[in-house]
Image: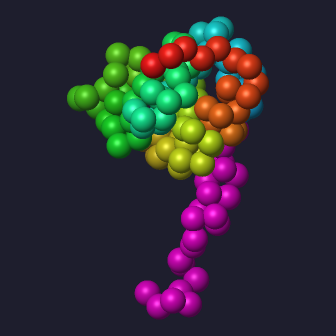
Amino acid sequence: MSAADPRRVGIDELLEQVRSGLDRVEAREAFDAASGGEALLVDIRYAALRERDGLIPGALVVERNELEWRLDPQGSHRAPEATHHDLRVIVVCNEGYASSLAAASLRQLGLHRATDLVGGFQAWRTAGLPVTEA
């Protein structure tokens, strides 16, 4: 492909495309959905960020590089929480960028209700929602 190839997209354009297919949620909505048993929060932040900033109580911690293997309901390495393709998964990263791409990847595995948290963990914390020490 040449530099002028129209099939090339930058990360900003890719992120915009991905987000147009997601029903992204704000922190309070994510909290209510998880508290009510309607969604599984999945924290994909790396260990240093979790240690620095804390954890969302009840969130499943799966680092980004393991996400698809752990959340695929048909996968041999799936987490016990990954029970079916209708599972509503809300992916949480640090600021809400990587989580959008991760949610799109989960949708490609058939988790059609996967989405992400607008603003990520930082938005959760700013909203005053529960955080525990790592």
Above-or-below relation of 73 to 94: above
Magenta stretch holds residue 23: yes
Residue pictured at 61% horizontal, 32% vertical: 121
Residue pictured at 35% horizontal, 16% vertical: 80
Residue 91 horizontal/vertical position (percent): 55, 33
Q: Is residue 87 left or right of residue 1?
A: right
Q: Quadrant of residue 35?
A: top right
Residue 94 or residue 25, whichever sits in front? 94
Disc tally is 0
> Start and end of the magenta stretch?
1-24
Q: Quadrant of residue 23?
A: top right
Q: Is residue 12 left or right of residue 54?
A: right
User: Which color scheme is applied?
Assistant: rainbow
Residue 5 horizontal/vertical position (percent): 53, 86
Image quadrant in which the C terminus is located: top left
Image quadrant in which the N terminus is located: bottom left
Question: Looking at the image, can residue 68 be seen?
Answer: no
Question: Looking at the image, can residue 47 be seen?
Answer: yes
Residue 131 horizontal/vertical position (percent): 60, 17
Residue 71 horizontal/vertical position (percent): 39, 30
Q: Quadrant of residue 113?
A: top right
Residue 118 or residue 127, whichever sits in front? 127
* Residue, far front: 52
Residue pictured at 60% horizontal, 48% vertical: 97
Magenta stretch holds residue 64: no
* Residue, far left: 76
Residue pictured at 76% horizontal, 24% vertical: 127
